[in-house]
């Protein structure tokens, strides 16, 4: 089973940063306090608190497996049975040329001919990011060489399952995992951590 924790950050939540920060070990507090913006600090604190909660609930030791933070969301995923990667992006206008090195010729052609290129790009991009995280090599793997079908992908010798996580119409999120696994989504609220 893969358990996914999601927390939507609301306007004004940053006011609770100090309370949440106190729940982390002092070395993490010091590192996070050096982040230049309070919203970045809050996302980082919440990611660690969500991961800790998910790991404890699943019987893991208190270690980090996978988390991702974007403007208004913190998402984390844990599993005892499979490697897992997760990515979420807020859709926005982009210059496709900036990403051409990370896309195959076929992917570029499909995006060029798409009736909804921004949505299709972010769907493809979050799949690639999730796979690269699950693979454990991050962006060091060659993104254009990933073969992505609708809900599966091949990277090297490994076949990854892909699942879209629908959280908000302005965001695209995907999770990548090997094998067949049940996905369980757990939504958190900031109040659980203050």
Image (cartoon, grey):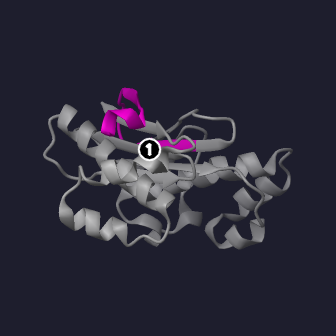
- For image coordinates 54% across by 58% down, the residue present is 146
Q: Is residue 104 above or below residue 91?
A: below
10 Å neighbourhood of mark 1: few (<14), some, or many (≥20)?
A: many
Looking at the picture, tell me which residue is in the foreground, 41 or 118: 41
Which of 105 and 31 lies nearest the eye of the viewer?
31
Where does the magenta region start and end?
A: 173-194
Q: Is residue 155 visible?
A: no
In the image, what residue occupies the spot 63% across and 35% down?
168
| The image quarter in which residue 172 lies | top right
Is residue 32 inside the magenta stretch?
A: no
Q: Which residue is mark 1?
A: 75
The front one of 162 and 189 is: 189
Residue under the point 72% across and 64% down? 105
Please indicate whether residue 147 sits to the left or right of residue 83 in the image. right
* Camera-side residue of 67 and 118: 67
- Examine the structure image and report whether residue 174 is included in the region drawn in magenta: yes
Residue 148: where, in percent of width, then height? 58, 49
Q: Quadrant of the C terminus?
A: top left
Q: Quadrant of residue 173?
A: top right
């Amino acid at each position: 089973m893969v358990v996914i924790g999601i927390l939507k950050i609301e306007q004004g939540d940053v006011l609770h940063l100090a309370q949440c920060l106190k729940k982390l070990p002092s070395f993490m507090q010091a590192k996070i306090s050096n982040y230049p913006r309070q919203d970045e600090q809050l996302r980082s604190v919440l990611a660690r608190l969500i991961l800790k909660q998910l790991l404890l609930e699943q019987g893991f030791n208190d270690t980090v497996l996978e988390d991702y933070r974007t403007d208004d969301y913190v998402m984390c995923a844990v599993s005892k049975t499979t490697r897992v990667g997760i990515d979420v992006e807020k859709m926005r206008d982009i210059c496709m040329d900036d990403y051409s090195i990370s896309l195959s010729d076929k992917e570029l052609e499909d995006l060029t001919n798409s009736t909804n290129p921004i949505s299709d790009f972010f769907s493809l991009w979050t799949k690639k990011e999730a796979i690269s995280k699950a693979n454990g090599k991050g962006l060091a793997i060659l993104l254009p060489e990933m073969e992505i079908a609708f809900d599966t992908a091949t990277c090297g010798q490994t076949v990854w399952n892909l699942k879209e996580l629908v959280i908000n119409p302005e965001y695209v999120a995907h999770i990548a995992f090997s094998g067949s696994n049940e996905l369980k989504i757990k939504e958190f609220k900031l109040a659980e951590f203050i």
